[in-house]
Image (cartoon, helix red, strand yellow):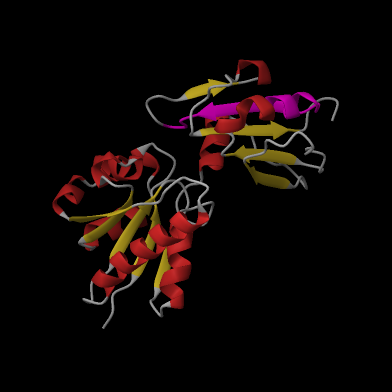
Amino acid sequence: MRGIAYGVGVGPGDPELMTLKAIRMIQENDIIAVPGKNPKESVAYKIAEAVVPEISEKTLVPIYMPMVKDRELIRKEHDKGAKLIESYLDQGKNVVYLTLGDVSIYCTFSYLQHILEDDGYEVQLVSGIPSFCAAAARLNEPLVEWDEPLHIIPAVHKEDEFLDYEGNYVLMKSASHMKEVKELLAKTNKKVLAVENCSMETEKVYRNLSEIPVDAGYFSLIIAKKGPNS
């Protein structure tokens, strides 16, 4: 029988925010896939290792997930990663793929999942704490209240875009366009907060728009809420 591919979210950074199920999945399976060329350098691996030190004795499978705009290169690497996972599944072994945050939100495993399922393999997802939920908790700020909608937007950086929908916003993957994002937010009356490297040792908290540096790191997340004049 073929094995099962599990996409497992390890949470935003603090090992204590890993779920019991994520821990159990790592403990019970011997093949651990990790995004990146060197598994032990992966942030997701380091989070898991802090809770499950025996992970270092398991078979670690590097899955290269290039962060580039070349769609053909991306497709080839995704196919290569999926085929590598399938080589273990065909041996009847389960594969646990570790990913930051939650496995269903802008997750690299999603690309592999589509390929694996198209090839007839079983895939199961194990949820983790999303980064924006952890950031809101760190800021002691409710993301939404009563009937407020929540909009989750990646890489908001176009000057002709406006955050004019009713409700609150989570802006993800904006670090490389932080200057443009700050200019966009300055045009609104929203209360702006941000967390960089949420729940990690290098965490930084910003409680207004002016505090957010334009060179904020990759793991920077912005929450824009209804302000006093919104």
Q: Which residues are magenta?
A: 182-199
Q: Which corner quadrant of the image does residue 195 belong to?
A: top right
Is 66 displayed left or right of 155 in the figure?
Answer: left
Magenta span contains residue 102: no
Up-down: is 216 above or below 28? above
Work out whether residue 3 or residue 78 is closer to the camera in this orientation and state it: 78
Give how far across and how far down residue 118 sits, in percent: 46, 76
Is 209 displayed left or right of 108 in the figure?
Answer: right
Give how far across and how far down residue 227 sits, in percent: 78, 27
Magenta span contains residue 197: yes
Is 73 displayed left or right of 156 in the figure?
Answer: left
Q: Residue at x 70, y 32 (%)?
A: 224
Give how far across and how far down residue 202 sits, in percent: 40, 24
Up-down: is 190 above or below 121? above
Up-down: is 81 above or below 156? below
Q: Residue at x 45, y 55 (%)?
A: 74
Is 62 displayed left or right of 164 in the figure?
Answer: left
Up-down: is 230 above or below 37? above
The residue most toward the left is 57
Work out whether residue 152 or residue 21 is closer to the camera in this orientation and state it: 152
